[in-house]
Image: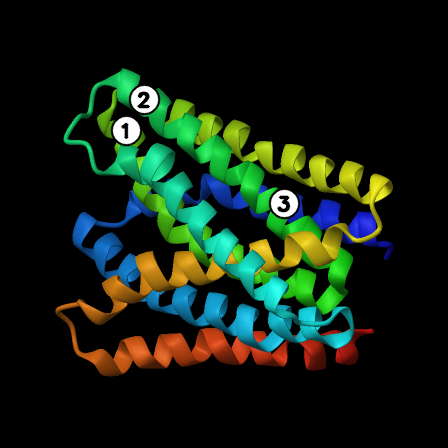
Amino acid sequence: MSTLTDIGTALLLTSILSAIGAFFLFLSKDKVDNLVEYLISLSAGTIFGGVFIHLIYRLANPIGYTRETGLLVMAGIAFSLILERTVHWHCHNQDLHEEPFSYVLLAGDGVHNVLDGILITTSFLASTSAGIASTVAIAAHKVPKEVGDFGVLLEGGFSREKAIGANILVSLFMFLGAGLVLALSTVSGNIVALLLPLVIGNFIYIAGSDLLPRFKESDTHIAPHLVMFTIGTAIMYAIPFIKQAIA
């Protein structure tokens, strides 16, 4: 498949995950909370694995890793912090559940989905393995996030059908992010060298500031979480071998 086909397929499959909340309606709240807890550990493993096994490797070979590249990684972390504080996590931390808040939540998700589109597209432009790794990492992080968002929308007055439809519609903003990267790539051939460090910084921030603390502070025994973390890392490591086997 061509790179554009790979990008389109990855964005479409990731968008479908926006309806994942509907499947958790058949489980009790305790079961959902318990399952999401372990999905967070899996997400941390996949994101860290994607960064250190694929993205940094692709950035260093053959693009090159310089001190300026390190500054771009730091800029990606700083940008993610600003984004979190001003839009998305601000929504989650408010003790409000009226419907206007639900639309603010969706607006924050829209911004994050634009960023997800940028992450996936930039990674595929670097290499197919890097693109797959980013897609799996985003998907693993998206599942527990979408479950939480779905519950907030229901509390905000949305019907189940409206909540599912809203999440799917907002997920299409990923294509906007992808289009932005593709447009920039036609103007500058060095766009991947510029954006990939920002992608790495964003992933490190997500896993390090949001997922890892929740993983560490869990009341359950650490062993199952370490198993899930290891599985996530192993999935990232296996991607090139799986890709070679099915090629």
**Category of crowding for the residue at label 1, using alpha-carbon neighbours closer than 10 angstroms: few (below 14), some (14–19), many (at least 20):** some
Left-right relation of 32 to 117: left
Q: Is residue 155 above or below residue 75?
A: above
Q: Which residue is mark 3?
A: 118
Q: From the viewer's perspective, is residue 222 above or below residue 34?
A: below
Residue 159, visible in the rendered structure: no
Residue where numbered disc 1 is placed? 154
SS for tag 3?
A: helix
Q: Identify the disc placed on residue 79.
A: none
Quadrant in which residue 216 is drawn = bottom left
At 62% from the left edge and 43% from the top edge, which residue is drawn?
117
**Which tag, 3 or 1, sits closer to the chain's start?**
3
The residue sitting at the top extreme is 100
Q: Label 2 is placed on what type of residue?
A: Phe
Task: Quickly name the residue at label 2.
Answer: 158
**Residue found 65% across the figure and 52% down from its top:** 195
Percent position (x, y) of residue 6?
Answer: 76, 53
